[in-house]
Image: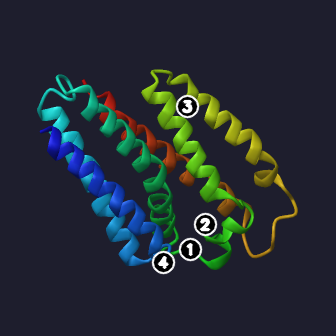
Amino acid sequence: MTAAVLVLTAVGLILAVVAWILPAGSISEIVVNGVMLACLVADGIILLAGDGITGWPEGWWNVLLLVSGCLAVAGGGPLTTSVLSLVDRNNTRSQSTQQAGEVLRGGALIGALERGAIYGSMVAGWPEGLAIVLAIKGLARYPELRSPDQPASVTPQAVAERFIIGTFTSVLWSVTCAGLPLSH
């Protein structure tokens, strides 16, 4: 069981790296992210069906902690891009969450830092850190969300939608990845 969980998590991490290379929002990226998500779900099923990580040697638990942390940070970006692409399927250009990226610059780096901080606070046993990360992000992005000087090529609703969907996807991904080494 230990080997299966570690292999699935490592495969998920490899798929996350591959997803960063693929064109954002492409069908191939969406498929790779779907398989990456399936690896995480399979991990969860294996851990729930067994005794979780109870009885694992500390060294293997440390490997899982490291690999799932890397997966949390690396996998959330492409996954969020895929979710936003799926949301944009029937939107006009001005309603596009992808176009809203013009207003919310630095999203990939901010998202990676956010996922790392959330993952770290969850595995450290301090879930309150999640609220602090979200509060800091909300306060930091507030001026961009409320700015009357947004480009005409994007609606304020698209900017808010990108912020909310991107944040929720990113947070759910990092919390789920943190659940792997915490399963008892």
In terms of secondary structure, where does tag 3 sit?
A: helix
Viewer-nearest of discs 1 and 2: 2
- Which numbered marker is on residue 23? 4
Asked whether residue 30 appears in the rendered view, the answer is yes
Distance between mark 1 and mark 2 Cα atoms: 9 Å
Q: Mark 2 points at which residue?
A: 97
Q: Mark 3 points at which residue?
A: 130
Distance between mark 3 and mark 1 Cα atoms: 31 Å
Seen in the image, is 97 located left or right of residue 42? right
Q: Name the residue under label 1.
A: 91
Q: Which residue is drawn at 31% across and 39% down?
A: 63
Seen in the image, is 86 located left or right of residue 129? left
Residue 112 placement (x, y as % from top left): 56, 50
Distance between mark 4 and mark 3 Cα atoms: 30 Å
Say above or below: 126 vs 102: above
Asked if disc 1 and disc 2 are in contact, CB closer than 8 Å, the reply is yes
User: Which of pointers 2 and 4 lies earlier in the amino acid sequence?
Assistant: 4
Seen in the image, is 158 located left or right of residue 43? right
In terms of secondary structure, where does tag 1 sit?
A: loop
Q: Residue at x 50, y 21 (%)?
A: 126
